[in-house]
Amino acid sequence: MKTLFSRLHLPLLLGAVLTLSTVALLSALAPATSAVAADSRAASVSDHLSTGFPLLGRHAQIECQECHVGGTFKGTPRQCQLCHIQGSRTAQTFKPVNHVQTVRPCELCHISTVTWSGARFQHVDIAPGSCMTCHNGGTASGKPGNHVPTTASCDSCHRTSAWIPAGFNHVSVAPGTCNTCHASTPKPSNHPITTASCDQCHRTTAWLPATFSHTGVAPPRVTSAIAPRPGCRQPSVIPASRPAPV
């Protein structure tokens, strides 16, 4: 009986031992295989320098056949725009339909080979006054909802390096009409109470310093204490014997 049991289970035991041995062997070889693959990729990246197209960023991470389709090396484009275009045999990403209209090479704006984001557009050859061709809110960022109402071109106030700071030329603005635009930047809560137009006290270059004309302001009545005028500075207590300021 014991011999029969051994004969029946011996193949199963040998199979289990063989399976465990195979798994252990593969596990032992796995790090070596990964190291060889890593060395092989590093060598490929290094050798690619001789082609005149260094593998940087995302290009160093993809498999060779993604660019060299069907193992074809000769004739593989080196220019970004020849690969990243609809219909290209190697294209994986290409210009979206709302891309800024330009025939410039990709690398002039997209300085990273890891991501398309963070592109910087050079406005050197852009005609003055044509900003809205791109900055229409679809192709490129346009005016926000709280923008000062104006039909002037973007470059009248903004630089090409950043939207802020911006400088508005007030030459053609009629005196007394400040609130037409500055309603979006209301007076602070500690502003003196007045219905006068902004330009009576403020300059167009900056809010401060400001000068207030006190003409027509009634002098305070001499009492033991002067009640603060609403919205104005609160003077210290002035004795009745001291003359009031003129």
Image (cartoon, grey):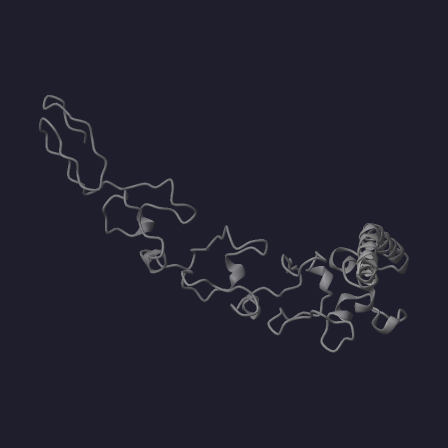
Pick out the residue farthest to the bottom. 87
Instruction: Say if residue 67 shows up in the picture.
Output: no
Figure quadrant of the N terminus: bottom right
- In the image: residue 142, left or right of residue 181: right
- In the image: residue 59, left or right of residue 212: right
Pick out the residue farthest to the front. 1
In depth, the one of 79 and 67 nearer the eye is 67
In depth, the one of 89 and 180 nearer the eye is 89
Figure quadrant of the C terminus: top left
> In this rendering, is residue 40 above or below 145?
above
Q: Where on the picture, by quarter, is residue 41?
A: bottom right
Q: Where on the picture, by quarter, is residue 58?
A: bottom right
Residue 208 image position (x, y, % from top left)? 38, 41
Residue 10 image position (x, y, % from top left)? 83, 60
Q: Where on the picture, by quarter, is residue 88?
A: bottom right
Residue 20 image position (x, y, % from top left)? 80, 55
* Residue depicted at 85% across the width and 74% down the height: 70
